[in-house]
Amino acid sequence: MAQTSLPNRTRTDQSMDEGAIPGDDTSEVTKLFHERLQAYKHATGFIEEYISQTEKMQHSQAKEYEKVLKTVSNPLKQADHFSREAGGIAEMFDNMRSNTQGMSHQNAETAKALKGIVLPIFERLHTEIKNKEKELTKGVGKGSKAVDKARAVTQKHIESLGQNTATHDSAGRKPDALSDPYILQKGIYFRLNKQITEENASRQDLLSVQNNFAQFETHIVQTFQQGMGHLMQTMSQQSDQNKVLYGNITHNIQRVNPLFEWNGFVKRKNDVLIDPNAPARTLSNVSFPNQNHKSTQPMIQGSLERKSGVMRKWEASVYAVTPSQYLHQFQSDDNIAKDPAPELSLHLPECSVGSLNGNLFNIKGKDISGGKLGSATATTREYAFKAHTNADAEQWYRVISQAVGSQTGTPGGSTVTSPTSPSDTTKSPTGSLNNPQSRNVSGSTFQGQEAGVTSSPGGSEGANSGLQGKPGQY
């Protein structure tokens, strides 16, 4: 049996960035397959009606053959799905029309055989095609809806990024913490990854359906052949003339290659069908408007430790100072596993910073990571930070101080506590510091990476060890 070879659609530049929101209609392939199933369903219905009318014709005179002819006199529905070349389904119906005109009369026994043997074959096939339509709707149809929903969410966040990057350089602008273009871009990566996962899953489902269609159409054509074969056996008992006419109909369908229509369909619709050799979408090949805009690039980012919790222990996290003059804290530098919402956000122009003591420094301000509602209820408090090395601390302190604009004092006359140097404290026998405001720096690292920071061109120069600054990554 001939094997199907689908045409390949290849891009001229495989490295070309793809748009975040493709312009293709996710439901187009599904609609095409629905139309194809309807075409075969109607074709099967034509044959069912043809045999049914033939059975009725056995009890009537020759003029009743005209009723049989009418069952196939109308053009096929969705006729563009069938080839007009010789050897296809369309030719089969043309042949049936011409041979039916030469039929004479039938008898009651032939009518019984047609009704009890031949007709049920096509009725079962008709039911199979209907079930295939339901399967297609419940399967890939839901996948297409999931893709459309994911794309809408991504588009919404891309538009939000565009609005905030457009007003980034406006004088006196203070964006919400969650409207920081840096945060918005990280959120786009998260949602874009979910969208691509849905797209690839939907694509794989459609590709599986597409590959199975050839096998299903082979079954349809073979069922046509089987049913018409039974019809020939029944009608061969009639006169030689009827035998010749029905034999001609059967001979015509028997010589149809089961994949003739499918191969022609693939050739005609290769611009719509999925290319199985085309690569799946990946996040690294996707771009979107305002990607890597200067407002999304941190002035400095890396690992710091901060005293937190009831026990006031030093805990390491990932921090970044953005061009919007925010100091953000994150649990990790992973933009994919979870939505990268900040755990702490300090708007540095509204904060004050104490003096640098070794690798320790304090910042006093309000955590506004909770958005507008959280900002309204947030209280001013003092946060203690520790860098992994003195050089790292100098880098962080220099960038933060430039954003704060003041190293001593806070609005209202309050001051920031200067941290105590580890050299000024002693350890207890258990290893803890007597001074609760400081700990000895052990050079610990965050999540198995080398301790350190990297400042972007917008920040200050310093040591280059540790986490490397990359667009959208730590």
Image (tube, rainbow, N blue to C red):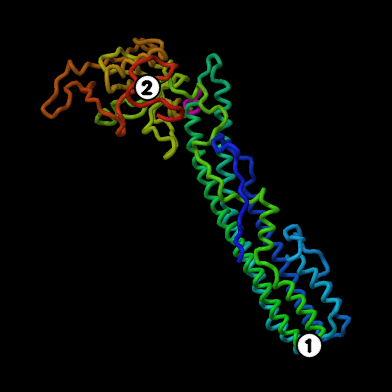
Q: Residue furthest right?
A: 63
Q: Which mark is residue 357?
A: none
Can you say whether 6 is above or below 443 in the image?
below
Q: Is residue 90 left or right of residue 104?
A: left
Q: Is residue 178 a member of the stretch shown in magenta? A: yes
Q: Position of residue 324 (x, y in %)?
A: 47, 20
In front of the other: 233 or 136: 233
Dividing the picture into quadrants, the one containing residue 344 is top left
Q: Tell me the SS state at disc 2.
A: strand
Task: Name the residue carrying label 2.
Answer: 454
Can you say whether 172 is above or below 296 in the image?
above
Q: Which mark is residue 238?
A: 1
Dividing the picture into quadrants, the one containing residue 135 is bottom right
Q: Position of residue 130 (x, y in %)?
A: 65, 66
Q: Tell me the SS state at disc 1.
A: loop
Closer to the eye: label 2 or 1: 1
Q: What amino acid type should be assigned to the residue bearing mark 2?
A: Thr
Q: Quadrant of the C terminus?
A: top left
In front of the other: 253 or 57: 253
Q: Quadrant of the N terminus?
A: bottom right
Q: Which residues are magenta?
A: 175-180
Q: Position of residue 26 (x, y in %)?
A: 62, 47
Q: What amino acid type should be assigned to the residue bearing mark 1?
A: Gln
Q: Position of residue 70 (x, y in %)?
A: 84, 72
Q: Residue at x 87, y 85 (%)?
A: 61
